Image: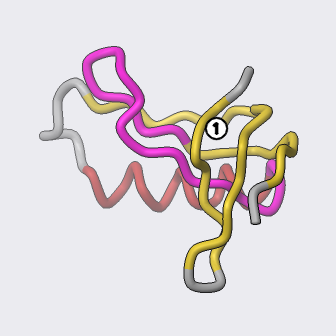
């Protein structure tokens, strides 16, 4: 089932295009996960940028987890 919601999402951006979008449970959770991802990526991954952003997105459930199909705004 697909729904449209406003959520905080972690966006992984490489060379100006979004390569991964993950919904989170709120701003605090988003920032916590962003910190973890940034540490795991390391400084040697040039061109990869991780951001927390409030987005309006089309969500769907896949094996019990919410995922973003596309960002509307």
Residue at 42% from the left image edge and 56% from the top image edge:
37
Residue at 17% from the left image edge and 29% from the top image edge:
46
Decide which of 7, 72 is in the foreground and name it.
Answer: 72
- Quick check: 3 left or right of 64? right
Decide which of 1, 52 is in the foreground and name it.
Answer: 1
Q: Position of residue 20 (x, y in %)?
A: 42, 45
Q: Position of residue 12 (x, y in %)?
A: 42, 39
Outermost bottom residue: 64
Range covered by the magenta-colored residues: 11-27
- Quick check: 39 left or right of 69? left
Outermost top residue: 16
Q: Is residue 57 magenta?
A: no
Q: Position of residue 38 (x, y in %)?
A: 40, 49
Residue at 68% from the left image edge and 53% from the top image edge:
30
Residue at 71% from the left image edge and 26% from the top image edge:
72
Q: Position of residue 56 (x, y in %)?
A: 79, 33
**Exactly how many numbered labels are in the figure?**
1
Q: Give above or below for 43 relative to 68.
A: above
Q: If the image is split into quadrants, where does the N terminus sit?
A: bottom right
Outermost left residue: 44
Q: If the image is split into quadrants, where does the C terminus sit?
A: top right
Q: Please tell me in which quadrant of the rendered image residue 19 appears.
A: top left
Q: Please tell me in which quadrant of the rendered image residue 26 appears.
A: bottom right
Judged by its main secondary structure, the magenta piece is: strand
Q: Give above or below for 29 relative to 42.
A: below
Which residue lies under the disc numbered 1? 52
Decide which of 47, 55 is in the foreground and name it.
Answer: 55
In this figure, which colouring scheme has been used for the structure? secondary structure
- Quick check: 11 left or right of 25? left
| SS type, badge 1 | strand
């Amino acid at each position: 089932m697909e729904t449209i919601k406003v959520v905080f999402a972690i966006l992984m951006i490489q060379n100006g295009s979004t390569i991964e979008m993950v919904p989170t449970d709120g701003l605090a959770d988003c920032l916590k996960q962003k910190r973890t991802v940034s540490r795991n990526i390391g400084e040697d991954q040039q061109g990869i940028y991780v951001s927390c952003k409030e987005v309006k997105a089309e969500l769907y459930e896949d094996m019990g987890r919410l995922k973003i199909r596309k960002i509307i705004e």
